[in-house]
Amino acid sequence: MKVFESKDIRNVGLIGHKACGKTSVAEAALWSAGENNRLGHTNDGTSVLDFEDEEHKRVMSVGVSVGSFEWAKAKINLLDTPGDGNFLKDTRVAMQATDGVVCVVSGKDGVEPMHERVMGWAQELKLARAIFISKIDAENSDFQKALTDVKENLCKEATALQIPIGAESAFKGVVDLLHERAHLFKDGDKGEFEETDIPADFKSRADEARNALIEDIAAADESLMEKYFEGTLTPREIIEGLSKAMAEGAIVPVLCGSGTTNRGVRELLDFVVESFPNPLARAAWPGRLDDTPSERPADPNGPATGLVFKTMVDQHAGRISVIRVLSGSLVSNTELHNAGKRSTERLGTPQRVVGKKLDAIERAPTGDIFAVAKLKDVHTGDTLSADGWKADTVKLSPPLIARALSTSDKGAEDKITDALRRIVDEDPGLVVGRDEQTGELLLSGSGQQHIEVAVEKMSRKFGVKCELRIPRIPYLETITAPVKNIEGKHKKQTGGAGQFGVCFFDLFPAERGTGFQFDDEIVGGAIPRQFIPSVQKGMERSLARGFIAGYPLTDLRVRLFDGKYHPVDSKDVAFQMAGAKGLKSAIPKARPVLLEPIMQMEIVVPEENMGDVMGDVNTRRGRVLGSETQGKYTVVKAQMPLAEAQTFEASLRAITQGRGAFTMEHGHMEQVPPHAQEKIIKESGFVASDEDE
């Protein structure tokens, strides 16, 4: 493909709820542009953009795909994004690389939960927005009903740019209100049409809709409004006014068609080229240079700068970085700084992306999107620049759930860790780590399906198989009552030098979060100074093993006040054993209990689901701390035990149909209720160790 100048590039994201028709629209665009030898479909595995096996299996996108192609003497970089809540973080990151979005809404189903989420992000990023009502040819599809739904529940700035001619199986064309023409579709799936006058039976409706469109365009610009009241706006004023109003977010044009039969998609692409902003119109990118705030304008002559917004991992080609050029031009062998890693990278050959297919290009100018393979240490979110400048990027919320990974092959753990690292490279919503207390290898993500897809990919791409389970809860043990005058004694005689040590101490509960406190109050040399740390060490070793369910014991204080020793038989190991034995004998008298992690949660709930969600929180031993209204949503602050919060994501998703969201972080440790403690102890199968005997 030839190199396009920045003014002739359009970067557009297809966004929306899952199964609304985004990928079908993208496939029709690629087919119309000659980038495929057939019209790809998601339901038969022929899609160019949904190329992963996991996408074929689920018939939905699980990651962002890029399709770059030429259209009307311009280059369109189309980003097909996931619409399932499990995979929206990939969508969120990729939207930064666009200058505008087309939100696809099904003519059958109307506005769905994820539409609200992604259109909200588009507004935050100040992207130009348009809406494509899809599936007009499907049974029970209703354009006018969907348009009303969009205006009332998604976007009050929406205004029709087209109206369909016919509906369901009789859908045969569209009326272009902007240019006052009708497009009647030809037979076949190439999306071709015949341009004609507007049919007489549609003229009245078209005139009414066009007048509403022009009035909306004029209302967005004071000078146009004056001309509108004085007479008629010229075609150029209308087209330019629409583009300006879109860029400012004052108007969201609505088009219609069908991706599966490729009807109305050519018109959508024509509109993208005519009215969507080019990269040079974008506001300067915020960022930092040498830790000082610094903006970077989209300047073709500026410092070469690229933002990595997507990473693909191929088992043969390795890591492939997809980059949006923010400034300057990027060519092969360009040396760039990775400010986040304080390292340098040398670019390989820039390549155009169409699904998983890569084609070499000469250079990538400002605003273009391209891929490059085998960079040394570059990940999604990194900035590559000639001068070390780093872009500010969106901040993602923490993962919602974690699952523990295990394998029966004990020698495969290093292989699993390496494969996980490569899978996490592909998806910014995944986090891998190890629980310090339980030692479990954890994969965290946005939901159960998110994690399952990652594990399936890992198995298919890297031959690593593992099982998923809910992680063990990192409970702790503590005491609730003091015990005094405890004797810890160790005496062993086996012939020759023996072992002897005795310690006397008091045991007290301590404040939550203080850990283990050891107070040495020995006087008069009852225990030689060199053996006092031995007593402490023996106790700490015993604490780590637990006493009632095998969890570490914490938040207690020991006051060591007396002891006995033997000049020959006393040694380090003897006083370690004495300390451990004394503690072991005292804990049952100190009324030990379990502590559990309590999570601080912020739950965003649609008003109509508030009662059901509050009820679910209460059944999970949760506590509601307060709430406040934010538009159509209520933000609930709550606390919930981690043991219950581990499955809350699936419940919230079901209750709110995916519209609810939450974040959580560790708050504090709290005593487990007696009935729950009894169950935990029984399930632990803990047997006290005789190691200290």
Image (tube, rainbow, N blue to C red):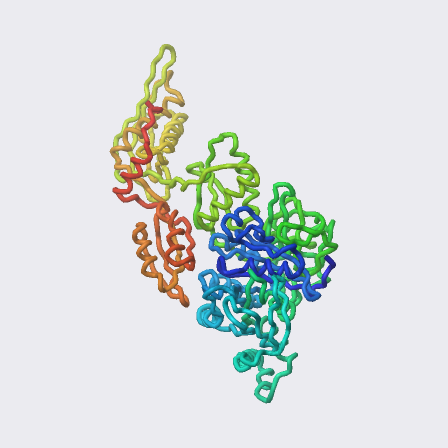
When asked about the image quadrant of residue 511, the answer is top left
Answer left or right for 354 relative to 442.
right
Q: In which quadrant is the N terminus drawn?
A: bottom right
Question: Which quadrant does the C terminus fall into?
Answer: top left
Question: Residue most toward the bottom?
Answer: 230
Q: Nearer the viewer, residue 504 or 495?
A: 495
Q: Quadrant of residue 352?
A: bottom right
Nearest the viewer among 97 and 103 is 103
Quick one: 630 or 650, which is closer to the camera? 650
Residue 572, given in percent of the width and then of the height, sits at 40, 23
Quick check: 581 left or right of 383? left
Most extreme residue toward the top is 495
Q: Residue 121, percent across and down? A: 51, 62
Total marks in image: 0
Q: Find residue 148 and report its horizontal and vertical position in percent.
A: 46, 72
Q: Is residue 188 left or right of residue 677?
A: right
Tell me: residue 404, above or below residue 263.
Answer: above
| Residue 490 visible in rendering | yes
| Residue pictured at 70% horizontal, 49% vertical | 347
Can residue 250 be seen here? The reply is: no
Percent position of residue 493, x then y: 34, 14
